[in-house]
Image: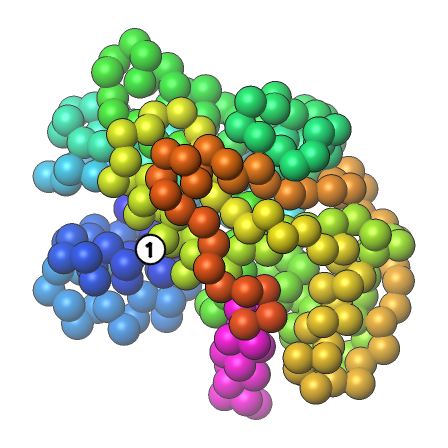
Amino acid sequence: MTGGAGFLGSHFCEALLASGTSVVCLDNLLTGARRNVEPLLGDPRFELVHHDIAEEPFTADVDLVVHMASPASPEHYRRHPVETLRAGSDGTRHALRLAEHRGARFLLLSTSEVYGDPLRHPQPESYRGNVDPVGPRAVYDEAKRYAEALTAAFRDSRGVDVRIARMFNSYGPRMRPDDGRMVPTFVRQALRGDPITVAGTGEQTRSLCYVDDSVRGLLALVGSGWQDPVNIGDPHEASVLRTAQLIRDLAGSRSPIVHVAAAADDPRRRCPDISLAERVLGWQPEVPVEDGLRRTITWFREELDRAA
């Protein structure tokens, strides 16, 4: 698995181990963290390898290749634009070639960002998107769009057994407090009593999917026979302002909510159509947003207390 020491990757490593699967976790630790997988290091079925899949290929005797390696937050992919593009291009190619040579199944972690600032709601897999190829989010959007195209090309021309997951706003424990995404930013600000900064009017919407549900969806996809893209997300849509208020209330915080300049190219609405996942995977999210946010806030509170 590439990017296995990241937020979502570390949870997926745990789930694979729990299912009886041995895991080789590759990560260059650009945005991942060794501490995310430290509890797994004592398991003889788990191996952590410091490796940049975008820089050079990797060889191992595997029957599943999971490609998660990429900066995933706006803060990180703007700081590392070339690395983000290379993770989607060279990294995907190296991971696909490993799957091809070993006859392994391949899972690509794509994203709802391939839809850009969507003009159709909710977004089904058939929607082709509204992406600015040179905008402020382009390095991530286009890296993932290219990765999907390359994955489909290896499927169609070389017979690689592929899976493509389009993830919608996964959140939960192990997100970096400084990664700039909505949930960790609001939680950190609420717990510290700082102003909670909502970009623009806050009327833009997001659909949050708790990490446990995201991982269940990925496991269902890996175990299925479906080779086209599938949305993995929670169709419960809420405004950014409402989410900020909810996090403040659940954290027991008195932080004021302040509005700051709207982020450039920020999608106005984001909500998955998951009818395909329900039909071909038998999957749908189970953790209510309030429950997932409570668990996330508890984890962040413990992390902040430990840091203090």
* Amino acid type, callout 1: Phe
Q: Position of residue 200 (x, y in %)?
A: 87, 53
Let me know if residue 305 is in the magenta part. yes
Q: From this viewpoint, is residue 125 visible? A: yes
Q: Is residue 295 magenta?
A: yes
Q: Quadrant of the C terminus?
A: bottom right
Magenta part of the protein: which range?
292-308
Residue 179: image location, x then y, percent: 60, 60
The residue located at (33%, 28%) in the rendering is 226
| Residue under label 1 | 12
Q: Which of 158/285 is in front?
A: 285
Position of 241 compared to 46: left or right?
Answer: right
Instruction: Please tell me which residue is depicted at 37% across the width and 70% down the height of the picture.
Output: 35
Is residue 52 something that shows in the picture? no
Q: Main secondary structure of the magenta part?
A: helix
The answer to whether 307 is drawn above or below residue 272 in the figure is: below
Q: Residue at x 21, y 68 (%)?
A: 41
160, 50: nearer the viewer:
160
Mark 1 neighbour class, 10 Å CA radius: few under 14, some 14 to 19, many 20 or more: many
Q: Is 232 above or below relative to 303?
A: above
